């Protein structure tokens, strides 16, 4: 046997051994070795509150048990400083949905997910608490089997007026339980009074993976229950199904609707319900959630359906601030699994509606870096190097829609050339996408706080250490224009780039 043949044989043996080890490890992991933060029992876990269409008077709670729990309950009461605040709590019956984790059934096909093979069926329970008082602190708890109650959680409904804040972050996705945990917990430390967390898609790496979702819930722990969640579906929150004819389309993982109770707009096709919706948070804020993933429905004209819906929603909105959120930033070149035609269709559907609909802010994820960009007011960019240019500080300048891309994941993309920072940022000229890019960062998991106080909206971008990296304030002035004031010290420091001034990076595949 020659040297090359021996080497190939040795390599094949190593690969085969590794494959057998991984298969055995996966089966063991999903069998007797399921971690305690993943395994379902007859006690309630994965408790998450979600925003409804009118968060001032309602919120939803969803939780999980094993399949031994059928009918179950939740309780709610106004919180008070009394020891027995719970006396007089209202008991509400829950709705229950069974989910076979090993064999997902959808209207478009089925999927057998081997990683979940030994996990069986779980039950997902939900309630929607309605007719609540605005800006009021409520306590609630949920039950698994009879007598198996969770602890009491406290959450405040949305205000009818006055200032408030929320946290926005992009993809959690990789290293969720180990690395993303510090990001969401630091976000709570920086803004402990945030009313909700907006997650801009790709909450996990593998949409049908119960292990991945278990990590997401474990990382956020009680924060998921005590601070309302506003989740946006991303491409990794989808899965591929199989039809009788063979390989089927990509569809939202059934775990999405089972785990999150979200507003249902009956004017939309069923494929888009709980994926596309509006949240009328207060007279100062409307949020419009879109599904940007090139899934079966969107590739059959769903982007146009959504853009028509969004156009009507924006025209009817009376809120002071309008925010659109979706997973994909259509204004950057996108690799959507080789479907650049889908990216083009998405841009053509959404961009004109957003630009003409007086949208103030677009919040996205998908590309694993931080970016702040804007369209010029009136569609005209300032001359290159002009005072008040995009990276300048000082006097406020008029802007159109602001666009932010952010990622909280341990996986970070190396996409920005150092020369662009020196020659492109701050010159006042739009890039190929028609936007002026103001601030970027790579190799830097981030979260953003957004404070709204009447005619002022302030966004601050924080690194996982709690140090601020970027900040700007939008202000609506009397003539209907939108102006921006950039916070100099926070927004003009060194740009964090892989090639220049960040720490060493190693591929996310070895995260434990």
Image (cartoon, rainbow, N blue to C red):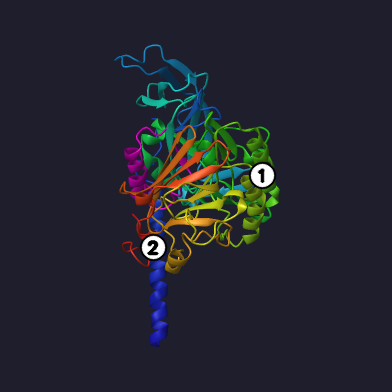
Residue 175 lies within the magenta run: yes
Q: Nearer the viewer, residue 201 or 510?
A: 201
Callout 2 environment at 10 Å: few (<14), some (14 to 19), or many (20+)?
many
**Location of mark 1 (residue):** 307
Q: Is residue 45 visible?
A: no
Residue nearer the viewer, 485 or 120:
485
* Residue 308 inside the magenta-drawn segment: no
Dot 1 crowding, Cα within 10 Å, few <14, some 14–19, many 20+: many
Relative image position of residue 137 (x, y in whole percent): 40, 22
Q: Secondary structure at mark 1?
A: helix
Quarter of the rendering containing residue 85: top left
| The N terminus lies in quadrant | bottom left
Q: Label 2 vs label 1: CA separation? A: 35 Å
Q: Disc 2 marks which residue?
A: 497
Query: Marks 2 and 1: CB-CB under 8 Å?
Result: no
| First-in-chain label (2 vs 1) | 1
Residue furthest to the top = 88
Q: Position of residue 208 (x, y in %)?
A: 50, 47
Q: Residue 24 vs residue 268: left or right?
A: left
Q: Please provide percent x and percent y for residue 436.
A: 52, 56
User: In which image quadrant can residue 453 be found?
Assistant: top left
**What span is in magenta?**
170-199
Residue at 35%, 66% (x, y): give it: 500
From the viewer's perspective, tell me whether residue 106 is left or right of residue 121.
right
Q: Residue lying at the far bottom in this picture: please name it.
A: 2
Q: Nearer the viewer, mark 2 or mark 1?
A: 2
Residue 239 visible in image: yes
């Amino acid at each position: 046997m020659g040297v090359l043949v021996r080497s190939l044989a040795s390599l094949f043996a190593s690969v085969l051994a590794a494959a057998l080890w991984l298969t055995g490890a996966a089966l063991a992991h999903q069998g007797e070795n399921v971690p305690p933060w993943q395994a379902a029992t007859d006690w309630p876990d994965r408790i998450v509150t979600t925003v409804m269409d009118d968060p001032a008077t309602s919120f939803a709670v969803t939780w999980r048990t094993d399949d031994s729990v059928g009918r179950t309950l939740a309780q709610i009461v106004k919180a008070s400083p009394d020891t027995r605040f719970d006396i007089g709590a209202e008991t509400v019956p829950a709705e229950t949905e069974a989910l076979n984790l090993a064999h997902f059934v959808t209207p478009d096909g089925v999927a057998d997910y081997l990683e979940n093979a030994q996990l069986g069926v779980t039950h997902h329970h939900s309630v929607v608490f309605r007719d609540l008082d605005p800006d009021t602190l409520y306590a609630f708890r949920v039950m698994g089997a009879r007598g198996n109650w969770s602890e009491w959680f406290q959450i405040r409904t949305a205000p009818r007026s006055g200032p408030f804040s929320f946290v926005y972050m992009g993809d959690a996705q990789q290293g969720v339980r180990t690395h993303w945990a510090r990001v969401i917990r630091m976000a709570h430390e920086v803004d402990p009074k945030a009313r909700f967390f907006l997650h801009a898609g790709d909450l996990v790496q593998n949409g049908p993976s119960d292990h991945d979702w278990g990590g997401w819930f474990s990382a956020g722990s009680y924060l998921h229950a005590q601070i309302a969640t506003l989740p946006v579906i991303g491409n990794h929150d989808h899965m591929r199904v199989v039809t009788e004819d063979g390989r089927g389309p990509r569809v939202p993982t059934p775990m999405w609707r089972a785990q999150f109770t979200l507003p249902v707009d009956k004017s939309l096709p069923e494929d888009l319900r709980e994926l596309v919706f509006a949240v009328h948070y207060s007279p100062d804020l409307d949020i419009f959630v879109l599904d940007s993933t090139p899934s079966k429905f969107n590739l059959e004209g769903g982007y146009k359906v959504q853009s028509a819906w969004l156009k009507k929603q924006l025209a009817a909105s009376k809120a002071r601030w309008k925010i659109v959120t979706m997973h994909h930033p259509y204004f950057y070149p996108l690799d959507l699994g080789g479907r650049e035609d889908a990216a083009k269709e998405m841009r053509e559907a959404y961009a004109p509606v957003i630009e003409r609909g007086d949208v103030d802010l677009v919040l996205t994820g998908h590309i694993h870096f931080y970016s702040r960009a804007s369209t010029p007011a009136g569609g005209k960019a300032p001359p290159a190097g002009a005072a008040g240019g995009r990276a300048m500080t000082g006097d406020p300048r008029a802007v159109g829609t602001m666009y932010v891309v952010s990622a909280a994941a341990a996986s970070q993309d190396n996409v920005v050339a150092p020369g662009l920072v020196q020659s492109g940022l701050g010159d006042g000229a739009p890039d190929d996408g028609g936007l002026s890019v103001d601030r970027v960062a790579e190799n830097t998991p981030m979260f953003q706080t957004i404070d709204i106080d009447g005619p002022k909206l302030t966004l601050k971008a924080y690194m996982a250490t709690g140090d601020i990296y970027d900040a700007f304030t939008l202000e609506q002035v009397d003539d209907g224009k939108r102006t921006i004031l950039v916070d100099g010290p926070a927004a003009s420091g060194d740009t964090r780039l892989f090639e220049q001034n960040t720490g060493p990076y190693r591929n996310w595949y070895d995260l434990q």
